[in-house]
């Protein structure tokens, strides 16, 4: 099986989230792994979260996935969009979370970043922010959470979105993403097809931003 692997350019928050939905829902479905970043600080909020009182005036975009609020800035973010043909854990949220994070931890070793993982969910008070709420299999560096993920399943497909909260140089990002793709390809026995977002997908995402991800009807849904 082929998996489309994309190391994308920085984009606006609404475009990044719209592209994930395009890949997740399109009729001509392709298993897709994408790493991406942000052109300016922005918040994403989980699908079921209430719209925040945003004191710092950064853009706020509601995701399809659940989870908590994330402030994006210099982080490297990712989405895994797969079907049950590739991902045997599609109906197991905990195993999906663990496999994604373990792959990230192994790939970070290639740029000499050694993380710890949380062996069990802590008793920390869960709050509005993802990085301040700890779950089993989150990744920590020097006691600080640096990786968390959230999920959405629709039929026999799953969308996993997450962020790596480290400031990485471009060369580090390229090495890390390449190793991530290679480690996962060995584990899942797929062929990596390196790709980029095409004009057709960009146009669909731009349309979706206008109709959905830049609107109060969606972002202030709750």
Image (cartoon, rainbow, N blue to C red):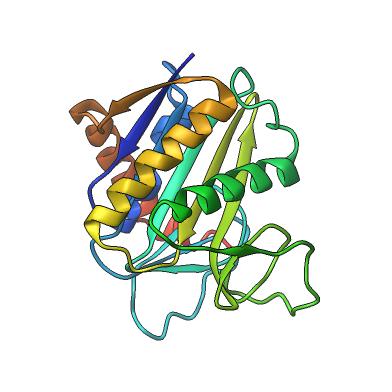
Residue 106 in picture, x, y percent from top left:
53, 49
**Residue at 41% across, 54% down:** 77
Residue 51 in picture, x, y percent from top left:
52, 69
**Residue at 74% across, 46% down:** 94
Q: Is residue 57 above or below residue 104?
A: below
Q: Residue 4 sits in which quadrant?
A: top left
99 lies left or right of 189: right
Q: Is residue 122 visible in the rendered structure shown here?
A: yes
Q: Nearer the viewer, residue 127 or 212?
A: 127
Q: Quadrant of the C terminus?
A: bottom right
Residue at the far bottom: name it: 55
Residue 49 in picture, x, y percent from top left:
60, 64
**Residue at 65% across, 26% down:** 155
Q: Nearer the viewer, residue 195 or 178?
A: 178
Q: Is residue 78 above or below residue 3?
A: below
Q: Residue 5 sits in which quadrant?
A: top left
Q: Is residue 21 visible in the rendered structure shown here?
A: no
Q: How many marks?
A: 0
């Amino acid at each position: 099986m082929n998996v489309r692997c994309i190391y994308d350019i920085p984009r606006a928050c609404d475009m990044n989230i719209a592209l994930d939905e395009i890949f997740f829902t399109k009729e001509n479905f392709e298993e897709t792994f994408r790493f991406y970043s942000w052109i300016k600080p922005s918040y994403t909020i989980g699908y079921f979260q209430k719209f925040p009182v945003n004191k710092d005036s950064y853009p706020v975009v509601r995701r399809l996935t659940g989870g908590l609020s994330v402030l994006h800035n210099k982080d490297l973010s990712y989405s895994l969009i797969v079907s049950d043909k590739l991902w045997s854990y599609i109906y197991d949220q905990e195993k999906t979370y663990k496999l994604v994070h373990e792959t990230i931890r192994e790939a970070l070793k290639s740029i000499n970043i050694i993380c710890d993982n949380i062996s069990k969910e802590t008793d920390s008070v869960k709050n509005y922010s993802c990085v301040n709420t700890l779950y089993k299999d989150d990744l920590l560096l020097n006691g600080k959470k640096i990786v968390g993920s959230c999920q959405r399943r629709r039929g026999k497909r799953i969308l996993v979105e997450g962020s790596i909260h480290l400031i990485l140089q471009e060369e580090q990002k390229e090495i890390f993403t390449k190793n991530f793709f290679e480690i996962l390809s060995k584990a899942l026995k797929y062929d990596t097809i390196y790709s980029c977002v095409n004009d057709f997908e960009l146009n669909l995402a731009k349309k979706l931003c206008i109709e959905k991800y830049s609107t109060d009807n969606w972002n202030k849904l709750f």
